[in-house]
C-alpha cells in the first residue's frame, strides 16, 4: 500500500467516487468570482488581475491550487483487500481544481485564451499566464511612459487633456508602475502651449509642493481666464477695423466734395489739380 493510502482514514478509503459532491465553499467561490474579480485579464492589467484573483483564492483556502502546494493525490489506491480502485481524494481534488480552472477562464480575455486552452490544471494555467505576460511587462511600461511624455494639449480642452493624462497614469498603475504626483504635474505642464507660459512659470516656482487636485483646479481656472482674454481681443478687433473704415470713408467723401466744389466754382470741367496746372 502506498504512503498516501496508508495515511488516509478508513472513511476516505471506503468512500465511493460517485458520492463526491461540490463543497459548499467551492459553490460560493464559483458564484462570486465574477463579482470579486472586477477586471478581465489582458496584456495591460496583469498585476491588478493577479492581485484580485490571488486574494480571492487565498480567502477561500484555494491558493495551493495556484501555487502547486496542494499536491494532486494519486489517481488509484490499493484497498485492504488488495484490489485497486479510484482514489476518492483524487476525485475530489480534480473536482475542485477543474472548477477553479474554469473560474480563471471566466476572467481571461479572448485574446489570451489560446495560450491556456490545452492546459490541464489550475497551476499550469496560472504559471503560463504569469510567464506569458511578464515578457511584455517592461516594454509596455516604456511605451506608456513615452506616450505620457508625448501628450500635448493641442486643440483639446483642459478637461479632455487631463482625461488623457489620467488614462495613461491609470494604465501605468495597472501595469505596476507608480508615478510621483510631481512628475504627473511636470508631464502636464510640458504639454501646454505658449499661452500658458506664465502659468507654467508660477507652478514651477512654487516653494511648496502642490496637490494634483489643486493643480487641476488652477489649470481649469487658467483656461477660463485665457479663453476670456481671447474673446475680449476678438470682440475688440472688429470695432477697431470698423472705426478705421469709417474714418477712411469720411476722408474720401470730404476729398470728393472739395474736388466737386472746386469744379463748380471754376466752371464746367475747368478745375484741375494744382500740380497739373503748374506743370501745364
Image (cartoon, grey):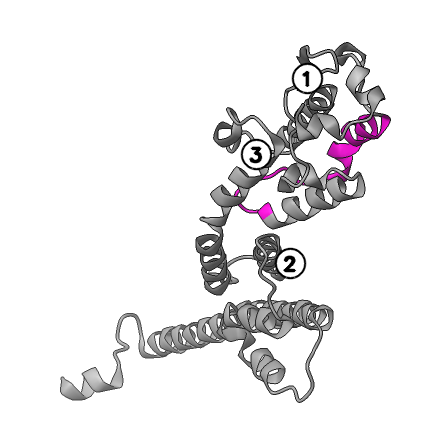
Describe the element under mark 1 as helix, strand or loop.
strand
Q: Main secondary structure of the magenta part?
A: helix
Q: Residue at x 40, y 77 (%)?
A: 255
* SS for dot 3: helix
Viewer-proximal residue among 185 and 39: 39
Q: Is residue 235 left or right of residue 13?
A: left
Disc 1 and disc 3: Cα gap in Å?
A: 31 Å
Q: Are marks 2 and 3 in contact (CB under 8 Å)?
A: no
Q: Nearer the viewer, mark 1 or mark 3?
A: 1
Task: State whether residue 37 is above or below residue 87.
Answer: below
User: Nearer the viewer's eye, disc 2 or disc 1?
Assistant: 1
Q: Which residues are magenta?
A: 24-46
Asked where in the image residue 102 lies, by quadrant, the reply is top right
- How far apart are the two marked residues, 2 and 3, measured between alpha carbons? 41 Å
Observer-side mark, 2 or 3, equals 3
Picture disc at residue 4: none
Q: Which residue is mark 3?
A: 125
> Which numbered marker is on residue 159?
2
Q: Answer with left or right where residue 7 lies relative to residue 142.
A: right
User: Is residue 64 a member of the stretch shown in magenta?
Assistant: no
Q: Give residue 149's position: percent from left, percent from top.
A: 48, 65
60 relative position to 138: left or right: right
The one nearer the camera, 87 or 126, is 87
Q: Which residue is mark 1?
A: 78
Amino acid at each position: 500500500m502506498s504512503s498516501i493510502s496508508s495515511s488516509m482514514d478508513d472513511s476516505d478509503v471506503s468512500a465511493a467516487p460517485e458520492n463526491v459532491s461540490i463543497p459548499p465553499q467551492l459553490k460560493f467561490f464559483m458564484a462570486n468570482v465574477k463579482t470579486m474579480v472586477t477586471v478581465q485579464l489582458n496584456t495591460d492589467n496583469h498585476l491588478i488581475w493577479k492581485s484580485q484573483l490571488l486574494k480571492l483564492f487565498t480567502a477561500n483556502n484555494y491558493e495551493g491550487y495556484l501555487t502547486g502546494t496542494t499536491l494532486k493525490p494519486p489517481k488509484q489506491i490499493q484497498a485492504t483487500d488488495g484490489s485497486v480502485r479510484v482514489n476518492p481524494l483524487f476525485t475530489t481534488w480534480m473536482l475542485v481544481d477543474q472548477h477553479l480552472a474554469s473560474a480563471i477562464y471566466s476572467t481571461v480575455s479572448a485574446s489570451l485564451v489560446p495560450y491556456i486552452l490545452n492546459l490541464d490544471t489550475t497551476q499550469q494555467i496560472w504559471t503560463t499566464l504569469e510567464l506569458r505576460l511578464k515578457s511584455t511587462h517592461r516594454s509596455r511600461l516604456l511605451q506608456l511612459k513615452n506616450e505620457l511624455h508625448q501628450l500635448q494639449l493641442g486643440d483639446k480642452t483642459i478637461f479632455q487633456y487631463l482625461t488623457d493624462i489620467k488614462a495613461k497614469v491609470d494604465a501605468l498603475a495597472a501595469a505596476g508602475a507608480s508615478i510621483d504626483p510631481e512628475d504627473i504635474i511636470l508631464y502636464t505642464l510640458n504639454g501646454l502651449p505658449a499661452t500658458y507660459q506664465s502659468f507654467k512659470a508660477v507652478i514651477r516656482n512654487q516653494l511648496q509642493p502642490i496637490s494634483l487636485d489643486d493643480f487641476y483646479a488652477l489649470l481649469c481656472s487658467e483656461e477660463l481666464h485665457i479663453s476670456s482674454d481671447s474673446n475680449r481681443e476678438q470682440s475688440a478687433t472688429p470695432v477697431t477695423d470698423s472705426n478705421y473704415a469709417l474714418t477712411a470713408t469720411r476722408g474720401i467723401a470730404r476729398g470728393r466734395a472739395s474736388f466737386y466744389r472746386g469744379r463748380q466754382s471754376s466752371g464746367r470741367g475747368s478745375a484741375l489739380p494744382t500740380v497739373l496746372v503748374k506743370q501745364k
